[in-house]
Amino acid sequence: MSASKDSGTGPIVDLSRQFLLAMPGMVGGNLANTVIYVCEHTHHGALGLVVNRPTDLTVGNLLQRIDLDLSLEIGPVQDTPVFFGGPVQTDRGFVLHGPAGEYSSSIPLGELALTTSRDVLQEVAEGRGPKHLLVTLGYAGWGAGQLESEMAQNAWLNVTASNDILFSVPPEERYEAALGVLGISSAMLAGDAGHA
């Protein structure tokens, strides 16, 4: 039997604009304990960004590395961390931002957009970029039927994404905040809670 039950003809549960929360003991490696914002989910597969794994790189450092001069008006966004977005294409930048603007390579996501073109970073460097933004290097990707299979194995919990959690909650608190939307905490998920 194939793990990919959906051949493109049956309906899928669209997880776009949802958070995926890695279940303890079910998701390992560099995706363990992650919160992933699903940007796109179709019968062809899914693309998401890890939103709770800041790197040592800041937006200001990134802009300088790609030879963009910083305006004095860039303000606190200069010290905002760049996130590990996932294990695929870690040398490529992805900008999740709101409101959605007019950029050369963007995918609209309701109030937000995912932009991969340099023009959004140019605007950020000039101090006139999007009001809210989350910059990642890399993304998390799933092939056709792969995410559905992992969901069926209870590897992920899903909950409707919240802009407040994305842009206002500190990265280290996003997992618990997203679980809180479901009315649970990580202590309720841990199989060996209380053991050292």
Image: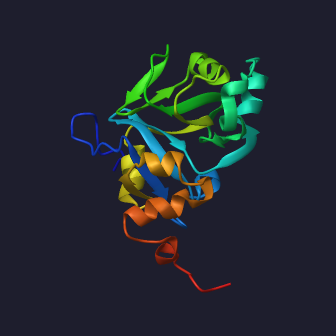
Q: Nearer the viewer, residue 98 or 183?
A: 98
- The answer to whether 32 appears left or right of 56 in the picture is left
Q: Residue at x 36, y 48 (%)?
A: 148
Q: Is residue 3 left or right of residue 25?
A: left
Q: Is residue 132 above or below residue 148?
A: above
Figure quadrant of the C terminus: bottom right
Q: Position of residue 111 (x, y in %)?
A: 37, 34
- Determine whether, in the image, residue 22 is placed left or right of residue 126: left
Picture residue at 67% right of the left edge, 28% below the top: 74
Q: Residue at x 73, y 25 (%)?
A: 72
Colouring style = rainbow
Q: Residue at x 44, y 64 (%)?
A: 179
Q: How many marks?
A: 0
**Hey, which residue is sitting farthest front in the picture?**
73
Residue 87 image point, x, y percent? 62, 41
Direction left: furthest residue: 10
Q: Position of residue 190 (x, y in %)?
A: 52, 75
Q: Classify residue 81 as left or right of residue 22.
A: right
Residue 124 lies in what quarter of the image? top right
Quarter of the view holding residue 55 = top right
Front position in the image: 1 or 31: 31
Q: Position of residue 186 (x, y in %)?
A: 51, 71
